[in-house]
Image (cartoon, rainbow, N blue to C red):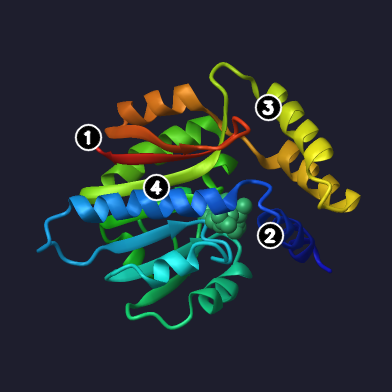
């Protein structure tokens, strides 16, 4: 198994055993998107949805399949996930696009990948699950400012991620999450637990939940929490242009 497969197999096991509450996340995502549809004029045209860090779409595909979209675009830094996502989505009655690219580059430059005009157009629904926490805090603020400029009027941004508690430093967060994995995730093998802890310690920079809400408001968004998980980490924020 290569590095990607090992990492992805560990992530798949987390999703299958619902260790990060992906099922509740999927329900909360459906609720947030449905509320947005319900508040739109019935004459509004079908929306374009962009998914940043789409992964393999294992959980989002059933919701996407029943949404009346103008298009779906899955963007991910890891090209190996894109065919998996395409397969999970299957045949849908709207065009789908698959883009290898960086979410920060999409926000700041609009063209994450040459030749993909679709990623440069204004976005009606922006979705991102468990990807933005890989950005440094300064880059998260840049992302929020730049992404705000990419939204169509009346758009919706559903941001699912891990967040630190207000005032909690990164070291304390990593120690807390590591204890959670070793104590509460027996469904993973020891090797899988080690992969996750190693990834978490090296790559994860969850935002302070209070600071990021303030940063998003400074960037021209209205922020409210749509769902908060049981472990003071996973959460879903609903952002709309202020
Ligand atoms: C933990 S997975 C989440 C996948 C999926 N959204 C889900 O909720 O199951 C994170 C995904 O984000 C992608 N990713 C991480 N950093 C990224 C970046 N800067 N730009 C685009 N994708 C990124 C990874 O390649 C990976 O597919």
- Helix, strand or loop at mark 1: loop
Q: Work out whether mark 3 precedes mark 2 in sequence or the reverse, and give the earlier one.
A: 2
Residue at 31% from the left image edge and 31% from the top image edge: 219
Looking at the picture, how far across and down is residue 228, in whole percent?
Answer: 50, 35
Which residue has dot 4 on it?
158
* Residue at mark 4 to residue at mark 2: CA–CA distance: 22 Å
Task: Find residue 242 and name its label.
Answer: 1
SS of the residue under disc 4: strand
* Ligand 1 located in image quadrant: bottom right
Tell me the residue at 81%/67% (across/down): 2
**Residue 9 drawn at (x, y percent):** 75, 62
| Residue 217 image position (x, y, % from top left) | 32, 28
Q: Which residue is mark 3?
A: 173
Give the labeled residue for mark 2: 16
Determine if residue 130 is in view: yes
Q: Residue placed farthest to the top in the image? A: 167
Q: Which element carries disc 3, helix, strand or loop?
A: helix
15, above or below 138, in the image: below
Decide: few, some or many residues near mark 2? Use Cα within 10 Å; few <14, some 14-19, many ≥20. some
Whichever of callouts 3 and 4 sits on the residue coming sooner in the sequence is 4
Counting residues from the start of the chain, the first of labels 1 and 3 encountered is: 3
Q: Looking at the image, is mark 1 or mark 4 nearer the viewer?
A: 4
């Amino acid at each position: 198994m290569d590095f990607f497969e090992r990492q992805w197999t560990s992530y798949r096991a987390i999703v299958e055993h619902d260790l990060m509450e992906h099922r509740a996340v999927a329900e909360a995502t459906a609720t947030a998107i449905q509320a947005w549809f319900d508040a739109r004029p019935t004459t509004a045209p079908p929306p374009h949805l962009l998914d940043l860090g789409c992964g393999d779409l294992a959980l989002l595909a059933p919701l996407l399949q029943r949404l009346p979209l103008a298009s779906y675009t899955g963007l991910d830094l890891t090209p190996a996930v894109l065919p998996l996502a395409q397969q999970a989505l299957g045949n849908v009655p709207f065009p789908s696009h698959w883009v290898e690219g960086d979410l920060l580059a999409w926000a700041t430059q609009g063209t994450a990948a040459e030749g993909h005009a679709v990623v440069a157009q204004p976005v009606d629904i922006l979705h991102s699950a468990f990807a933005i926490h890989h950005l440094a805090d300064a880059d998260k603020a840049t992302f929020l400012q730049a992404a705000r400029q990419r939204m169509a009027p009346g758009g919706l941004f559903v941001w699912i991620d891990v967040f630190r508690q207000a005032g909690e430093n990164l070291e304390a967060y990593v120690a807390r999450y590591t204890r959670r994995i070793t104590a509460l995730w027996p469904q993973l093998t020891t090797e899988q637990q080690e992969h996750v802890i190693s990834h978490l310690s090296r790559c994860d920079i969850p935002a302070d939940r209070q600071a990021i809400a303030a940063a998003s408001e400074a960037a021209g968004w209205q922020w409210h929490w749509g769902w908060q998980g049981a472990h003071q980490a996973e959460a879903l924020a609903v952002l709309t242009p202020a």
